[in-house]
Amino acid sequence: MAEQIDGNVLAAKSLAQFGVQHMFGVVGIPVTSLATRAVSLGIRFIAFHNEQSAGYAASAYGYLTSRPGVFLTVSGPGCVHGLAGLSNAGANTWPTVMISGSSNQNDVGRGDFQELDQIEAVKPFTKFAVKATHISQIPNCVAQVLDHAVSGRPGGCYLDLPTDVLHQKVSQSEAESLLIEAKALAEKNKKNNRANVEASKIEQAISLLRHAERPLIVFGKGAAYARAEDELKKLVEKTGIPFLPTPMGKGLLPDDHSLAASAARSLAIGKCDVAVVIGARLNWLLHFGEPPKWSKDVKFILVDVSSEEIELRKPFLGIVGDAKQVLEILNKEIKDDPFCLGSTHPWVDAISKKSKENASKMEAQLAKDVVPFNFLTPMRIIRDAILEFGGSPAPVVVSEGANTMDVGRAVLVQKEPRTRLDAGTWGTMGVGLGYCIAAAVAYPDRLVVAVEGDSGYGFSAMEVETLVRYQLPVVAIVFNNGGVYGGDRRSAEEINGPHKEDPAPTSFVPNAGYHTMMEAFGGKGYLVGTPDELKSALSESFFARKPAVINVVIDPYAGSESGRLQHKN
Ligand code: ADP
Ligand code: MG
């Protein structure tokens, strides 16, 4: 009899054929053999403790590489845990594919092992979901989910592989022809993100910018995903227009560029009259583009790959297209007739003055060595250590938490594109270690430095074992202030109320030994409470390029409730 292969092998072959190089996930029934087969075909499989973190990792991998990040889960509960990653991918518009095993199709409705209508469960969180109901459909289904994840506005997609399908068999030669057919079909159906950009819109955009008195260029993680850094640099330098990155847009142009308006953010967005917004949504992070933060007369030029986004925001001028492509055309059309504002232009001068003023106030705060640590002192030491460690390539910074993330965003300096990953559009806590693992895998030449609140860190802390297992160069710095926002800060009356023997909902065990947890797995742990201790832990761990946790003891009274979002809590 001709040699036969099963659905697991065919799925692994399909993933390899369509260019998947890394997969994240948790193995178990019925997908273990899919993972091991994928590994034997050259795909690197990073095995996690929890599908949630694996999903976060896959999504960040998608963002960092512009290729779909793929993660694998078991059926039922595995799929449900994975929804965290899938939904966060959708919120961030990052190309991500979740592949889950599912129950035998014949047993559906009878309470099979880990039974769940997974296609229905993923629906709210995916742009495309498909089930292979027969082994012959596997190659084509794999091609489709991978393509949907990256085409148009990127996002989460789902592939369902029932147990019976994974166990069905076809002959080797039939498998080969299924793979060839799927490849031909995929090439025929390949969607093109580089749509036709209307010339009149480009002209209009240039004219708006040329006649603006106080123009501003805003860019976000959509522009970072599009790898539009060279074109952005050209536009900014040609026109002399100040720019403002969103948190993950940081680094597309260096934070210390003379036209960076981050330190004068309120002035820049409050007073600009024309703002070109590229690959960033006018959502809560940008105050919906509305007063009082923005002027009521500001004219937005919105560049986004998604026509729905343009329809939703109704900007003065909307340009649907890939950020890199639109910027290329803009730069070309500006031609040799640039309208460079120059440093003496009143708007550029005002922003530059305000930036310098705010930066020097911040520096004065940062210069103090406050012990027990507040947030600023250790953040300055971390900033300086990262800068000293150097660029080319610069470390990737991962950050989550409330106060820790707010302070880190303002203080840490990004000079290279896609070197910052944070809680993102959804403000998701628990993404940290998954993102670290993704960054280390996607960018093997870069060090990864996580700056995390103890609460955010705790969501996925067990994944430090994964760091050690794969020997990833990740240094996780935990700002340990004993809780969410801080330690137990209740007044005497509050403590006298009901359940007075319980700690406050915001607090954790004080002085938790996070560094010893890392040591338990054979990684390096540091406990630090003074500037010298922190400096020495940073320089040792950065140069070692080995998994490490630095447990930084922070004054439990130093942070503010809810960080910057106090009005919402
Ligand atoms: P930020 O959080 O940095 O403000 P958002 O996630 O809010 O960024 O916005 C990113 C936007 O970028 C989304 O609306 C998405 O549709 C868009 N986008 C994604 N890929 C591209 C691309 N290649 N070109 C232009 N825009 C893109
Ligand atoms: Mg905390």
Image (spheres, grey):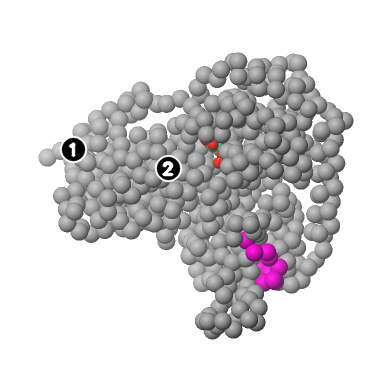
**Residue at the right extreme of this rendering:** 344
Q: State which quadrant residue 375 falls in.
A: bottom right
> Which of the marked residues, 1 or 2, is nearer the chain's N terminus?
2
Residue 561 within the segment the image draws in magenta: yes
Side of 146 relative to 290 (left or right): left
Q: State which quadrant residue 377 falls in.
A: bottom right
Identify residue for label 2. 156
Badge 1 vs badge 2, beta-carbon distance below 8 Å: no
Residue 502 appears anywhere in the view? yes
| Badge count | 2
> Which type of secondary structure does the marked residue at label 2 adopt?
strand
Looking at the magenta stretch, what is its main secondary structure?
Answer: loop
Residue 275 within the segment the image draws in magenta: no
Identify residue for label 1. 171
**Residue at the left extreme of this rendering:** 1
> Which type of secondary structure does the marked residue at label 1 adopt?
strand
Side of 166 relative to 355 (left or right): left
Q: Nearer the viewer, residue 457 or 206?
A: 206
- Split into 4 quadrants, where in the image is the N terminus? top left
Kind of residue sitting beneath label 2: Gly
Residue occupying image coordinates x 63% and y 44%: 287
Q: At which x and y percent is residue 200?
A: 60, 15
Q: Nearer the viewer, residue 289 or 142?
A: 289
Q: At which x and y percent is residue 330?
A: 65, 21
Q: Which is in the foreground here, disc 1 or disc 2?
A: 2
Q: Is residue 307 above or below residue 128?
A: above
Q: Which residues are magenta?
A: 551-562
Q: At which x and y percent is residue 558?
A: 71, 68
Q: Is residue 327 above or below residue 351?
A: above
Q: Is residue 365 above or below residue 148?
A: below
Residue occupying image coordinates x 70% and y 19%: 207
